[in-house]
Image (cartoon, rainbow, N blue to C red):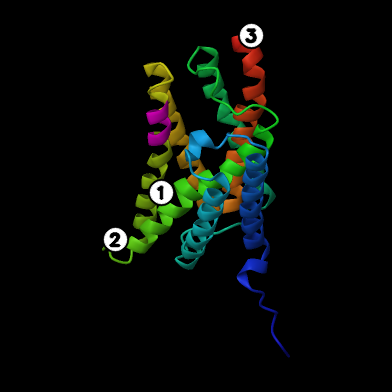
């Protein structure tokens, strides 16, 4: 009697979800770029957004394969409980930063406007998770073969290291756009956001971590990003 059919990795539901996310992110970049939008410029600079998104996606998938091989993190498997947790935490973490914004912590032009935001933020969330988390963690996983530490300690080192990258970028950008007190809070807030995201990654998988960031973006950047212009700036 033959055993169960073993499908290629890319046909398994969790990996198929990762590949679909990457394809969707690249397609969104292509649509916005073809429309003449420059929404990616403040993130990618003069680099072509389609080529950049595709390159990061390819490297990110390789990083996730490596992390899975080392049993550090998985692509998916969070289930409904993981999704509920990700959505609640992602939306909940917007509350304190909304208060900071209400107190005058951020300038008017920090968000991509609707309707471009409906494509941009789901796309850039994929890029952010691969760039700030999957790729650095994969690098630490490779280095762990040369380190004298136990695997769980190296994984912890990787998580703490990966959590610092995005806050550094955010604070560097905010130093020219936000008051010192608001920028200091952003550093702490984004570091905590990254730690929570990596906890979700470890427990529930990459896809659930993506949902966590997407929930945050949909509340903070898309919904509030549209409302705040009228409420705070009269635009």
Query: How far is the residue under mark 1 from the one under mark 2?
Result: 15 Å
Residue 168: quarter of image:
top left
Nearest to the observer: residue 107 or residue 185: 107
55 lies left or right of 81? left
What secondary structure characterizes most of the magenta part?
Answer: helix
Label 2 belongs to which residue?
A: 149
Q: Position of residue 222 (x, y in %)?
A: 65, 29
In primary-sequence order, the first of circles 1 and 3 is: 1
User: Mark on residue 159?
Assistant: 1
Query: How far is the residue under mark 2 from the one under mark 3?
Result: 55 Å
In the displayed orientation, state which residue is furthest to the left. Answer: 148
Label 3 belongs to which residue?
A: 234
Disc nearest the viewer among 1 and 2: 1
Q: Which residues are magenta?
A: 168-173
- Residue 135 is a magenta residue: no
Disc nearest the viewer among 2 and 3: 3
């Amino acid at each position: 009697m033959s055993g169960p059919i073993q499908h290629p990795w890319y046909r398994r539901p969790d990996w198929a979800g990762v590949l679909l996310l990457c394809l969707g992110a690249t397609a969104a970049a292509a649509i916005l770029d073809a429309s003449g939008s420059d929404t990616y410029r403040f993130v990618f600079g003069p680099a072509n957004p389609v080529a950049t998104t595709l390159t990061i996606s390819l490297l990110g998938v390789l990083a996730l394969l490596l992390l899975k091989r080392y049993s550090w993190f998985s692509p998916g498997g969070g289930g409904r409980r993981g999704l509920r947790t990700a959505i609640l935490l992602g939306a909940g973490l917007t509350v304190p930063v909304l208060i900071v914004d209400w107190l005058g912590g951020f300038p008017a032009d920090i968000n991509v406007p609707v309707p471009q935001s409906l494509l941009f933020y789901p796309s850039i969330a994929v890029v952010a998770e691969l760039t700030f988390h999957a790729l650095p963690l994969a690098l630490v996983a490779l280095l762990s073969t040369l380190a004298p530490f136990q695997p769980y300690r190296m994984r912890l080192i990787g998580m703490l290291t990966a959590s610092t990258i995005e806050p550094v970028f955010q604070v560097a950008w905010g130093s020219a756009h936000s008051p010192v007190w608001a920028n200091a809070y952003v550093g702490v807030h984004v570091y905590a956001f990254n730690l929570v995201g990596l906890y979700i990654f470890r427990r529930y998988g990459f896809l659930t971590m993506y949902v966590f960031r997407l929930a945050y973006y949909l509340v903070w950047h898309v919904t509030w990003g549209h409302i705040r212009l009228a409420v705070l700036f009269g635009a």
